[in-house]
Amino acid sequence: MDFSTIKRNIEAKSGSSYKNVQEIYADVRLIFKNSELSKEDAHEQLKHMRALMPT
């Protein structure tokens, strides 16, 4: 999952689009969770993401 896929799904006119905001939120959280798991991410970036997405 990535932000361009989310954008494509939001803009889709067919059945592949999101049905509600919760589906978008779930995909954004997935991106953030995957970023946290990546060893290449910097500490500052993780701190900002955690501030945006409280648990």
Image (cartoon, helix red, strand yellow):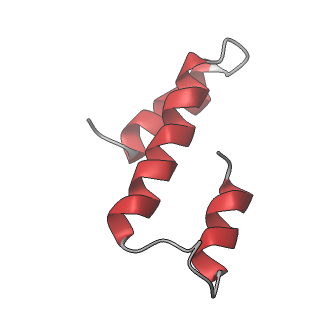
In the rendered image, the residue lying farthest to the front is 15
Residue 9 appears left or right of 46: right
Instruction: Tell me where residue 19 appears, x and y as whole percent.
Output: 41, 74
Residue lying furthest bottom in this view?
13
Q: In the shown orientation, is residue 18 left or right of residue 12?
A: left
The spot of residue 20 in percent (x, y) is: 36, 73
Q: Residue at x 48, y 29 (%)?
A: 47
Residue 24 vertical position relative to residue 28 in the rendered view, above or below: below
Residue 9 vs 2, above or below: the answer is below
Where on the picture, by quarter, is residue 38? top right
Q: Which corner quadrant of the image does residue 24 belong to?
A: bottom left
Residue farthest toward the left in the current orientation of the protein: 55
Asked if 25 appears above or below 41 in the picture, the reply is below
**Residue 35 quadrant:** top right
Establish if 16 lies above or below 6: below
Position of 9 compared to 36: left or right? right
* Relative depth, front residue between 47 and 38: 38
Residue at x-position 59% and y-position 71%: 16
Q: Position of residue 3 (x, y in %)?
A: 67, 56
User: What residue sits 68% from the left and 49% below the top?
Assistant: 2
Q: Quadrant of the N terminus?
A: top right
The quarter of the picture where the C terminus appears is top left
x and y percentages locating residue 31 in the rendered image: 56, 40
Q: Nearer the viewer, residue 17 or 10?
A: 17
> How many numbered discs sit on the rendered protein?
0
